[in-house]
Image: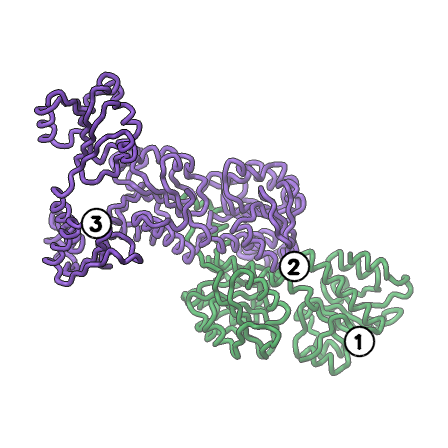
Amino acid sequence: MASAIAAATAPPTAAKHSVLLLRRANDYLAATLRARYRVLSFYDSAAPLPAFLAASAAALPEPPRAALVVGGGSIQIDATFLDAAPYLRCVVTTAAGLDHGDLAECARRGVLVAGAGEVFSTDVADHAVGLLIDVLRDVSAADRYVRRGLWPVQGDYPLGSKLGGKRVGIIGLGSIGSSIAKRLKALGCVIQYHSRRPKDTVSFKYFHDVISLATESDALIVACALNDQTRHIVNKEVLGALGKDGVVVNIAHGGNIDEAELISALREGKIAGAGLDVFEKEPVVPAEFFSMDNVVLTGHEAVFTTESGSDLCDLMIGNLEAFFDGRPLLTPVLPK
Amino acid sequence: MDSLVVLLLYPVNAYLEQELDRRFSLLRLWEHSPPDSLFHAHGSTIRAVVGYPGHKVDAALLDALPSLDIFSSFSVGIDHVDLAECRERGIRVTHTPGVLTDDVADIAVGLAVAALRRIPQADRYVRAGSWKAKGDYTLTTRVGLSVTLSLSSLNKSTSAAYFSRSVHRCPSTTQRSAASASHPPQPHLPPAVLAAATATAMESLGVLLLHPMNAYLEQELDRRFRLIRLWDSPPDARADFLRSNASAIRAVVGNAGYNADSALIDALPSLEIVASFSVGIDRVDLAKCRERGIRVTNTPDVLTDDVADLAVGLAIAALRKIPQADRYVRAGLWKAKGDYTLTTRFSGKRVGIIGLGRIGLAVATRVEAFDCPVNYYQRTKKEYPNYTYYPSVVELAANSDVLVVACPLNEQTRHIVNREVIDALGPKGVLINIGRGPHVDEPELVSALVEGRLGGAGLDVFEDEPNVPEALFTLDNVVLVPHVGSGTHETRQAMADLVLGNLEAHVLKKPLLTPVV
């Protein structure tokens, strides 16, 4: 589908706009971009970033006015970066969002920012539900048990915990949190949430702070952005309030949870288990987790399906097109 | 007198037999084998029969005795006699009222006292040396209680006997008028006496537990009934074990893996009820149970949610490769080799369900929240506005991305997922089996997965549990769990309570909670 759009509206070669590619691209993305734009790819050049940005100023026919980045990735779209690339007027991020500080900098300079919108919500929500079922029903642990040949030797696997009736506290009820809520409701869970402000459009119970949410929840799912207010939003106190039968699932950012406290809480049996797709120092995952049977670990892959890859590609092209056409961005991100 | 030929049906009393022999011309039924030979030889001369409650007097017996004038029962109850037939043939019927009234009344009071004061149990306690070893027996409950009776059900002399004894034991006795129509015409005992009598009845139910399937269930069976554990006997001594316990065993508790099959039922002549700790009862010989009048119960509904949740969990795990990703991370490969592979989205996948029963419907409503179109196959098409019916499993598989087995196992559904179905599901398709191992042709499934002809699978059940084909252990496109569909604390407790409830209902002659047969 994306290639059809690309083919239908690709401009003639001479009129192609220049675009900075500041992220690794798979073949599909690279091919789709090259069909429509003159791509200046950082990861294909040998230069360090400042030199690359300086050289791009001299690109023909014009310097790149738009850049594709990974929000929250290794290249920060901060003041230093924007100073080194003053020709940029639009940043299209292919992750969930930019750091709050970076957004403010862009806004100050009139640089438009396009985000990934809700392109990832479905897959992240599915992954969150998969992790929660896995933690409560021991899917991965039981799979290990069978593969190790233990079923005939040690007998039936120990009992898990029923999902139905569990009170699930969602931290952050944006597009992802709402998608998770919809799915878990169909599995008989009681949904409640914390976010900066209560949402009029939902009937779920709202909690002003995370500790009260944790106190009254059997499971916590972290689905919020990462900023100064939400760094370590799940901390020692919250884990204590969640309690020894509680589980936590994180498909947001490693920084949302105090990882060291999480490890101690799990070690000491202060909570019952965790499902984690994100970690504080990816791709480093603390070895302490590896010996825990009540933890499920995946490598920041909640978004990585072929479908979201192609959905994202469509969206990025759509945003770039809108920008170069002078139309409003499809998924603009404004500082909050 | 010696011309009266009397047939005695059973050696019920030595004095009776001796006097019948002395005064009349006595024939003894049990001396003739087969009984028909007696009827052939003497049928037309027999003018009187003396019987007892254990031998039915029906048209068949009366046909064999064309000269019969009188039937005398050595009992007061004559429910074993077809009175209508006797009337029609002009045969007189007598019984023995009055003379036994005192004894029966005495026993009733005796039983009530024995039950409330746990006398037989205390006797066993002393004989076992427990008084010395463990100290005093438990406290029991006072007998001094009112006993109310509905007089309409009892003839006057009997009720008077109960009444007089009650007055002596229990000062506060009341009589209920026979005219009170709202009360059932039965002897009505107050709760404590009823509880004691009930407890005694419960404790006498011998229950054979086939496997240590659940600690709570086992503990409660032991507490409420007379529990016999099949695994107390070594496997090679099983036949003898069953033989020596056969007369006591009136109930069997089995589960998905171990249940009352033909051989076991044959070995248990006193079996009255099979209460399965499962919803699937493919391992119970239902035909044999029906034949022998054995009741069968299972545990539907309480486990529906858990099994449906697992189906969804397995589907997501299989499509998104969660256990595989977990292995990848634990092996340090995320750091060493980079991101794990791309997988495929679960939401929006076409889900095909074989069998839209309780579990199938629960799966359907769950996947609808993931915007999955729902297709189904079952023997009869029903009106589901949102679900698409396919008239065969192959067509269902051809039009689905995820195929879920959710039907009961029987002769028609064995290997319902065969090579043809697997091929139709295809290299991108995923099979989820939360039914029974034999629903799927396992060798075909294994080769399809190994060869990549089938995209993936999430399996909770296998043809020969707990043995899982080892060829699956190294595959990355399959998720394997050891029959944990209903394996949560909450659900197993609810299942156990259902088993216990069915057994209690059986003892109390109340309607069974969840009967299958």
Q: Which residue is mark 3?
A: B154
Q: Which residue is mark 1?
A: A89
- Three-letter residue code for mark 2: Phe
Does mark 1 fall on the same chain as mark 2? yes
Chain of residue at mark 2:
A
- Three-letter residue code for mark 1: Arg
The CA distance from mark 3 to mark 1 is 101 Å
- Of tags 2 and 1, the one toward the viewer is 2
Chain of residue at mark 1:
A
Assign a secondary structure to mark 1: loop
Q: Residue at x 78, y 58 (%)?
A: A2
Crowd around label 1: few <14 · some 14–19 · many ≥20 (10 Å): some
- Chain that appears purple: B
Residue B242 position, x and y percent, is 29, 36
- Chain that appears green: A
Chain of residue at mark 3:
B
Identify the image quadrant of the N terminus of chain B. Answer: top left
Q: Residue at x 54, y 38 (%)?
A: B413
Residue B442 position, x and y percent, is 54, 38
Residue B465 position, x and y percent, is 45, 41
User: Of residues A272 and B475, which is closer to you in this image?
Assistant: A272
Q: Are discs 2 and 3 less than 8 Å apart at CB? A: no
Residue A304 has which mark? 2
Assign a secondary structure to mark 3: loop
Left or right: B11, with A13 as reference point: left
Answer whether residue B442 is visible to the viewer in this image: no
Q: Is residue A68 above or below residue B293?
A: below
- Three-letter residue code for mark 3: Leu
The CA distance from mark 2 to mark 3 is 80 Å
